[in-house]
Amino acid sequence: MLNPELRAGRTPPAGADYPVRVPAGKGAIAAGNLAKGRREAPAHERVTVRFGETLAEVAAAHKVPVAKLMELNGITAGEVVRGGTVLLVPKAGDAPGAGAAPPAAPAAKPVVVVPPDVFVYPDRKRVFYRVVTGDTLKDVANQFKVTVDEIRRWNEIDPQARLVEGMTLQLFVPDGVDLSKTVALADRDVVPLTAGTDEFFNHFEERGRKRQTVKAKAGETLEQVGKRHQVSGSLMERINRRPRADVLKEGELVVVYTAPTTTPPAHASRAVAPWPAPPAPSSPQEELAPLP
């Protein structure tokens, strides 16, 4: 009651000292109990969340269960932790299960799809940013010192589109921008696929999906056609290189990628090219397409 600003179970990790109000006459007892608590409590360190970093990633980096991080920092279920937030984490060696971890196998580079347009800037470098919950185009633009219009152009984002968790954006960041507080991937850390190329189409074939051309019904949108074939709107945009909201004409041909175990609809035409029998189907990854 005396400290209504303290909504969590502890003072914020903002400095060496924090004034706390206690009932009159209880100062000496409170000070003694606080000193005792510091001696008995595990040691903690302050960690600043990077832009684009999730709570799960912070927990994994420090070998701490996510539930423990939430408990330590008074984070409620579903609460979004944004870049710049300071968290308390147990120091190395104090976390449950901490210790020398076996070396991890090198992870495969993520595949990202980029538009066919080529952008060349002598004073910029290309990086890739994976959207997290709560991001907006304005947030991303401010963080990377670019404009919202530039992000839309670099990724062929429709003005009405919104960012979706897991989608990946290509960004051309001016030289000198500090990326140390941001989770961003360099060119060498990803495998870029240009939309519409043979490599782009072959990638989805290898992932167990079959390329087909289908005829649209009058008034259908690209997204609606994709929904009939269990293909996301973002993937439909990338495959057909046009906005998902485009209204199609009766009989207009649209390219889709379907799981090979499903029976094609009666209006589907023959595959564009013969395809070998692919492995078991897998769901398309939203991260492959920078559009929602």
Image (cartoon, rainbow, N blue to C red):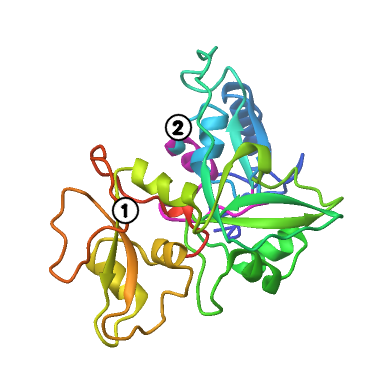
Q: Earlier in the sequence, mark 2 or mark 1?
A: 2
Q: Mark 2 points at which residue?
A: 65
In the displayed structure image, the side of residue 18 where residue 156 appears, left or right: left
- Neighbourhood count class around disc 2 (C-alpha, 10 Å): few under 14, some 14–19, many 20 upward: some
Q: What stretch is highlighted in magenta?
A: 67-85
Nearest the camera: 203 or 23?
Answer: 203
The answer to whether residue 9 shows anywhere in this view is no
Q: CA–CA distance between discs 2 and 1?
A: 49 Å
The answer to whether residue 35 shows anywhere in this view is yes
Q: In this view, does 42 lie above or below 67?
A: above
Q: Is residue 239 above or below residue 55?
A: below
Q: Name the residue under label 1.
A: 273
User: Element type at marker 1?
Assistant: loop
Residue type beneath disc 1: Ala
Image location of residue 87, percent across then percent down: 61, 42
Q: In this view, does 196 lie above or below 128?
A: below
Image location of residue 20, percent across then percent down: 67, 49
User: Element type at marker 2?
Assistant: loop
Residue type beneath disc 2: Pro
The structure residue drawn at horizontal position 66% and vertical position 62%, both measured from the top left corner, is 140
Image location of residue 2, percent across then percent down: 59, 57
In the displayed structure image, the side of residue 214 where residue 2 appears, left or right: right
Quarter of the image for the N terminus: give it: bottom right
In the displayed structure image, the side of residue 229 where residue 35 appears, left or right: right
Number of the front mark, 2 or 1: 1
Q: Is residue 281 magenta?
A: no
Quadrant housing residue 151? bottom right
